[in-house]
Image (cartoon, grey):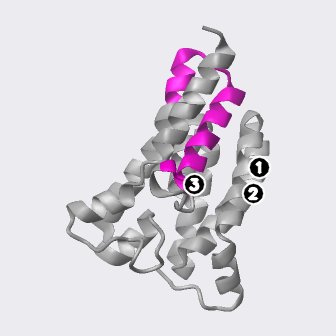
Amino acid sequence: MTDSLVSVLFSLGAYLSGSVMFAPIVCRLWSLPNPRAQGSGNPGATNVYRIGGWLPASLTLLLDAAKGALPVYAAAAYGLGIIPQAFIGLCAITGHMLPVFARFQGGKGVATALGAGVALAPATTLILAAIWGLIVWRWRISSLASVCAVLAGPVISALLEPDALPLFGLLALLILVRHRDNLIRLAQHREPPV
């Protein structure tokens, strides 16, 4: 089997993995309301935190990150190069944003990007996670933290892990597009805190 075919198969598997929406599953396990119908309506860890607190939110974050990390780790273990690994990670993130199992109505992709980033470029990703954490600690607005972190991603990647720069550049574009409503609310000072 050629590496090209293997990359296509890994990419498809990553997209399908990303399409599994864990926030509604975790909320059902905790007997919480459907996150699509509560809070921000986003099926992600931040909204689960608003609905049910840190424990279900942490599990959602872990599962959403794992579906980004595991396909990349699997591709690396198979021996695929960093560019195919980055594309496979993007497929997992795209699956979370546009999930085939949920009528293409997904989340923002930040947790899945975190997982893919840890697998592909851990130093850059850990710095971005620290930036995210500091901004949430200071201003208590998750979307602001996410936007600042993804904008810093290409710069930090270029300095520390330049092979992963295409991943962080595309991630910045994807996540900014997914946060367009949040950006409008931020500009209008209407974005809710966590």
Q: 81 or 87: nearer the eye?
A: 87
- Which residue: 71% across, 47% down? 168
| Contact between labelled residues 1 and 3, with CB atoms less than 8 Å apart | no
Q: Specify the quadrant of the image occupied by residue 188.
A: bottom right
Q: Which residues are magenta?
A: 73-100
Circle 1 crowding by C-alpha within 10 Å: few under 14, some 14–19, many from 20: some
Residue behind mark 2: 173
Q: Position of residue 47 (x, y in %)?
A: 42, 72
Q: Quick one: label 3 or label 2, which is nearer the N terminus? A: 3
Query: Of label 3 and label 1, which has the lower sequence position?
Result: 3
Residue 169 image label: 1
Whether tag 2 and tag 1 are in contact, CB under 8 A, the answer is yes
80 or 136, which lies in front? 80
* Crowd class of label 2 (few under 14; some 14 to 19; many from 20; radius 10 Å): few
The amino acid type, in three-letter code, at marker 1 is: Gly
Q: Residues within 10 Å of mark 3 (few under 14, many from 20)?
A: many
Q: Residue at x 51, y 79 (%)?
A: 140
Q: Position of residue 183 (x, y in %)?
A: 69, 78
Outermost residue on the top side: it is 1
Q: Which mark is residue 3?
A: none
- In the picture of the structure, the residue carrying the numbered disc 3 is 98
Circle 1: element type: helix
